[in-house]
Structure formats: C-alpha cells, structure tokens
Image: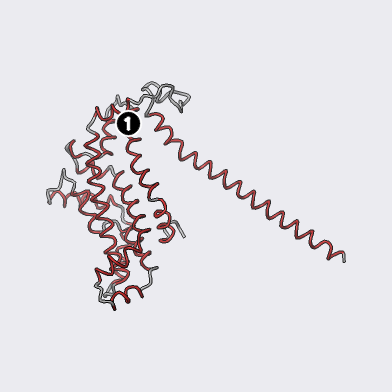
Amino acid sequence: MATQTMTPSLATGQHSNRRITRIAGLVILQIVMTVCLVTFLAPTFWMVSSSLKASTEVFQHPIVWIPESPQWSNYTKVFETLPFAKFAWNTFIVVALAVIGTVISTAIVAYGLARVEFPGRRIVFALMVATIMLPEIVTLIPRFIMFRTFRWIDTFAPLTVPFWFALTTLYVFLMYQFLRGIPKELDEAATIDGASRWQILWHVILPLCKPVIATIAVFALIQHYNEFLTPLIYLNRLDNWTLALGVRALNDSNLANWELVFAASTLMLIPVLTLFIIAQRYFVQGIALTGFGGR
C-alpha cells in the first residue's frame, strides 16, 4: 500500500522536474538567440546611425548610437558626389541578367541530370559537384584571358553571360536535390498525354519548384548584388560601375567622408533586405526541402 501511495507523488515530481528543465532550456535558448541577434544587428544599426551623423560624430568615443541632429543631407550628398543613380541602374541590369540566367540554366541542367537517363549521367554529376571545391580564384586568370580575347573587357558580359551556362554548381546541386523528391510518375503521366521534355519541364516540374527557385534566386541576387572583385577587374569606365564599386570609390582617398560611405551602404542594403522579407516564406521552405540548412 505504501508503494502504491508514493507512486503518484513520484510521477508528479518527475513531471514537474521535466517541465522545469524544459522551461530552463527555453530560457537559455532565448538568451543565446538574443545575444546572437544583438551581435549581428549592432554593426548594421551603427552603420545606419552613422549615415545620419556629422563627420565629427562617426568615430566619437564613446560610441554615439543615436545622432543628436540627424544629417539627412548625407544621402543627397551621395548622389551629388558620384553618379549613384547610374550605378544603381548598372547594378540592376547586371543582377537581373545574371539571376535570370542562373535560374533558367540551373533548372535545365538539374532537370537533365535528375530526370533524363543518358550514359555517364552519374559521372557528369560527380564531376560537376567536385567543382564546388575548386576555389574561384584559380580560374580568375584563365577567364580574364578568355574574356579579353572576346573583347568583353569594360562590358557587362563577363558579369552576366557565364551565368547563362549554369556556372554556379551549388545551385545546380540544390535544384537536383529538390527534383529528386518529385515523383517521376508525374513525368510518365505527362508523357502519356503527349507532352515533350520541354513541356514537362516548364508546365509540370517548374511550377512545383517555386520554393527552391526562390531560394536560388535570392542567393544569386545577393551574390551578384554584392559582387566586388569581378566588376573591379572588368569594369574600367565610371559609366559602367556598379554600386559596390561606387561605395568603394567614396572610401578611395585618405580623406574619406565616412558618413557618406555609410549612407551609400545603407541605400545599398535596402533592396536586398526588402526582397528577402518578401521572399522569406519561399526562401525558408526551399532551404528546408533541399537540405541546405544542414539536415
């Protein structure tokens, strides 16, 4: 009888201990996440804040997080100092062409590797994936020599044309992984209905690939939007510069106006941040379904 009387008490105590442990774990997790969030956001907040400061306040010690008198004129000075509107238009052209080319070519190549049977398919895929480990800097000189032969120097071609040929293997791998999760019975049913390979790709497969397409598009947009080395090598004339080169030009002298550098950086941040917020649902879903998050 004594044992039977104590059993409910022991069960209640164990349940209470588990609940306390779970709550403590959640509290610790929230604290760690908050610390990480502050660590990541603090530099961005300081950059935005510094874009509204006078030149004497930017590196003032202790740090001034909120300027006493916001200098909104810093943003107009950015456009007066350099043709940033032209840089923004150039960046838009480069990013649009590169992202569209990346998405289309990636979809075609990944579909061919995942759904079309041909001799040596696995070998081709293995060789393509192996190139992920190849540092981009290794191919820098050969590409420059090739593009110079094509007379592409000081044009947008080196920044856009290669990406119409599925240049970024990582995106092909992501799309390939996603396509493997789509039943092949859909292809067979479409084939029975008389659809060609192209019709199956554009009308059956791609509509199901919106999450991974959004993920690849966002990654590609950030990649090309922030690209600095490639425009620096191939674009010489000021009229062809992108935003990344323009921001660097503001810091190209010993007497750099850092408030203008931060104002230009803040303007450059807005489009990417806006796009990420809009495409966040597809972005997160695409990462989860392709296993890119480490699953």
At horizontal 19% and vertical 40% (from top left) the residue drawn is 240
> Where is residue 54, by image quadrant?
top left
Judged left or right of residue 13, residue 90 is left
At horizontal 35% and vertical 35% (from top left) the residue drawn is 266
Would you place residue 286 above or below residue 58 in this image? below
Residue furthest right in the image: 1
Camera-side residue of 124 and 247: 247
- Residue 3, x across and y down, in percent: 84, 65
Q: What residue type is labelled 1?
A: Val
Judged left or right of residue 252, residue 10 is right
Is the N terminus in the top left, top right, bottom left or bottom right quadrant?
A: bottom right
Q: How is the image coloured?
A: secondary structure
Judged left or right of residue 87, residue 50 is right
Would you place residue 273 above or below residue 259 in this image? below
Question: Residue tagged by mark 1?
Answer: 261
Residue furthest front in the image: 193
Judged left or right of residue 212, residue 66 is right
- Residue 194, x across and y down, in percent: 25, 76
Would you place residue 134 above or below residue 60 in this image? below
Q: Element under label 1? A: helix
At horizontal 35% and vertical 66% (from top left) the residue drawn is 179
> Where is residue 12, by image quadrant?
bottom right
- Residue 109, x across and y down, in percent: 27, 64
Number of on-image labels: 1
- Residue 246, x across and y down, in percent: 26, 35
**Category of crowding for the residue at label 1, using alpha-carbon neighbours closer than 10 angstroms: few (below 14), some (14–19), many (at least 20):** many
